[in-house]
Image (spheres, helix red, strand yellow):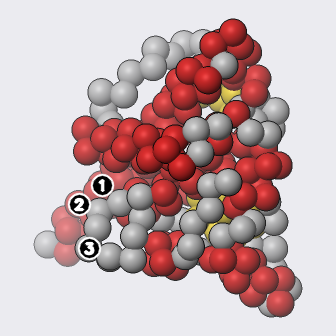
Amino acid sequence: MIQEHEVSLLKMQKRFMENKLLAFEYTIKELIEWYKSLVPNEETNVLSKLSKLKLFKLHFFVAAVNSTSDSSTDDLLNLFNKFYALPYGPVEGYIYDHLNELQFYSIFNDHVEVKSSSTLNFDQLDYTTKVKIDDAITILKEKNNNLVILPAFDLVEISHKWPVWKLLYANALKEGRRNEFMPSELIRISPKFFE
């Protein structure tokens, strides 16, 4: 009986992780659309404007923008729950470690490519997650509509304003490390910056 329960838990965990990757890719798609809406004459070059660093900074802002100190709120930090304070700001560790498993995009240090064999189809991503991402991006646009077109290192500087990153990264350095886990609860209560 215990084995069946363990197998069931493993299957649920695998589905959760697959959903996390798909949600990240959906976020990329929506960031690309946002970028295109601001710079329509660069539509063909938009993928060359999105580096790995830039996507990870934008992803953090999307994941955290709707979060509040109310722990009963079902926000994106329940899904994207493995952020780490790194030298260039917060990065979701599971996403970073599994970039090679993305279905639709290949992410490089200086650009993004749509995988040639893929049709962007997010039907397998649950509707609730799509709505959360869409809502988060809408709120992010209200906070700073130009965020998506800023250079990567401007986004790094913005992420360095977050007290939660400052505190945890300083602790990591004090302990001789270059990263520190960022509990979702601390991200939620931290003052947030988008400019």
- In the picture of the structure, the residue carrying the numbered disc 2 is 8
Tag 3: amino acid = Ser
Q: Residue farthest to the bottom?
A: 175
Q: Do the residues labelled 1 and 2 touch (CB within 8 Å)?
A: yes
Residue at the spot 76% in from the left edge and 23% down from the top edge:
48
Number of residues whose C-alpha sits closer than 10 Å to that of mark 2, classed few (under 14), some (14–19) or many (20 or more): few
Number of residues whose C-alpha sits closer than 10 Å to that of mark 3, classed few (under 14), some (14–19) or many (20 or more): few
Tag 2: amino acid = Ser
Compared to residue 183, the image places residue 50 above or below, namely above
Provide the secondary structure element on which disc 2 rests: helix
Compared to residue 154, the image places residue 70 above or below, namely below
Measured as percent of width and height from the top left, residue 20 is found at 43, 49
Q: Say which of 169 and 6 sits in front.
A: 169
Q: Are marks 2 and 3 in contact (CB under 8 Å)?
A: no
Number of residues whose C-alpha sits closer than 10 Å to that of mark 1, classed few (under 14), some (14–19) or many (20 or more): few
- In the picture of the structure, the residue carrying the numbered disc 3 is 72
Q: Are marks 1 and 3 in contact (CB under 8 Å)?
A: no
The span from disc 2 to disc 3 (Cα, nearest Å) is 25 Å
Q: Say which of 62 and 28 sits in front.
A: 62
On residue 123, the disc is none
Residue at the spot 62% in from the left edge and 62% down from the top edge:
193
Tag 1: amino acid = Lys
- In the picture of the structure, the residue carrying the numbered disc 1 is 11
Precedes in sequence: disc 2 or disc 3: 2
Screen quadrant of the N terminus: bottom left
Precedes in sequence: disc 1 or disc 3: 1
The span from disc 1 to disc 2 (Cα, nearest Å) is 5 Å
Compared to residue 98, the image places residue 75 above or below, namely below
- Residue 23 visible, this orientation: no
